[in-house]
Image (cartoon, rainbow, N blue to C red):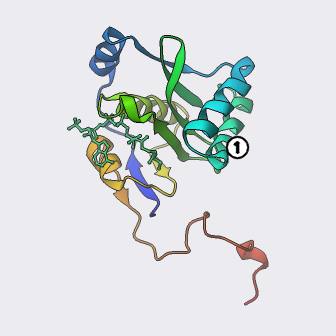
Amino acid sequence: MPDMLVSLVHLPPVGDLLADLRQQGILLRRVNPWELTDFREFVEGAFSRAWADESSITLANKPVSVFIATRGGQIVGFAAYECTRRNFFGPMGVVPALRLKGVGKALLLACLYSMQDLGYVYAIIGGAGPVDFYAKTVGAIPIPFDEGKGIYPLTEDPRFAAE
Ligand SMILES: CC(C)(COP(=O)(O)OP(=O)(O)OC[C@H]1O[C@@H](n2cnc3c(N)ncnc32)[C@H](O)[C@@H]1OP(=O)(O)O)[C@@H](O)C(=O)NCCC(=O)NCCS
């Protein structure tokens, strides 16, 4: 899974998409710190413990750097940024029943606009799974490094590795 690079200079508009989702009862917002347990349990139950751990870190950031989509008060998707490294986007996920309705794109753009606000010109999508989704929605391109140049496969801190 490659890391991907996305320009934050010309992000697609998100207002119409948010309005469309609102019509369907799907609302986006940041997680509140007092919702940490509910949020963590959602991510672990729907996706994985590792993503739950990784994305929970965002609740210590100010502002909190994770958006959720809710429907009827239930979390149905999430997207996080500035978890594992600065300027990293991810992880993200939408429950299977609500995929292909624009929820993922809206969550992704909510995060990328927030990263733009932080002053970044580009963002890195760390260990991107659905490469075509990121390419299609925000024009992200895979970073053409060989395997092993990103942080996820590391087994030893490169500074301390043997020559
Ligand atoms: C990837 C994921 C978040 C996409 O969420 P989603 O709500 O289904 O995506 P959207 O409905 O916003 O899709 C936006 C566009 O991307 C397309 N798209 C969605 N998933 C895609 C995929 N896996 N590959 C290619 N295109 C995809 C949609 O068809 C849509 O195209 P359109 O604008 O022409 O209609 C969701 O499939 C998911 O949770 N997957 C499992 C977790 C995961 O892989 N997370 C990423 C970790 S790096």
Residue linked to disc 1? 53
The mark total stands at 1
Image quarter where ligand 1 lies = top left
Residue 163 appears in which quarter of the rendering? bottom right
Q: Nearer the viewer, residue 127 or 46?
A: 46
Mark 1 burial class by Cα count in 10 Å: few <14, some 14-19, many 20+: some
Residue extending farthest to the right is: 160
| Rendering coords of residue 104 (x, y %) | 39, 34
Q: Position of residue 66 (x, y in %)?
A: 58, 31
In the rendered image, residue 70, in percent from the top left (x then y), is placed at 49, 18
Q: Ligand 1 closer than 8 Å to the CB at disc 1?
A: no
Residue farthest to the bottom, as pictured: 163
Judged left or right of residue 101, residue 83 is: right
Q: Residue at x 45, y 55 (%)?
A: 128
Q: Secondary structure at mark 1?
A: helix
Q: From the viewer's perspective, is 111 left or right of 100?
A: right
The structure residue drawn at horizontal position 53% and vertical position 25%, both measured from the top left corner, is 68
| Residue placed most toward the observer, 135 or 100 | 100
Q: Is residue 129 above or below residue 27?
A: below
Percent position of residue 156, x then y: 74, 74
Q: Amino acid at mark 1?
A: Asp
Q: Quadrant of the N terminus?
A: bottom left
User: Which quadrant would residue 131 be assigned to in this image?
Assistant: bottom left
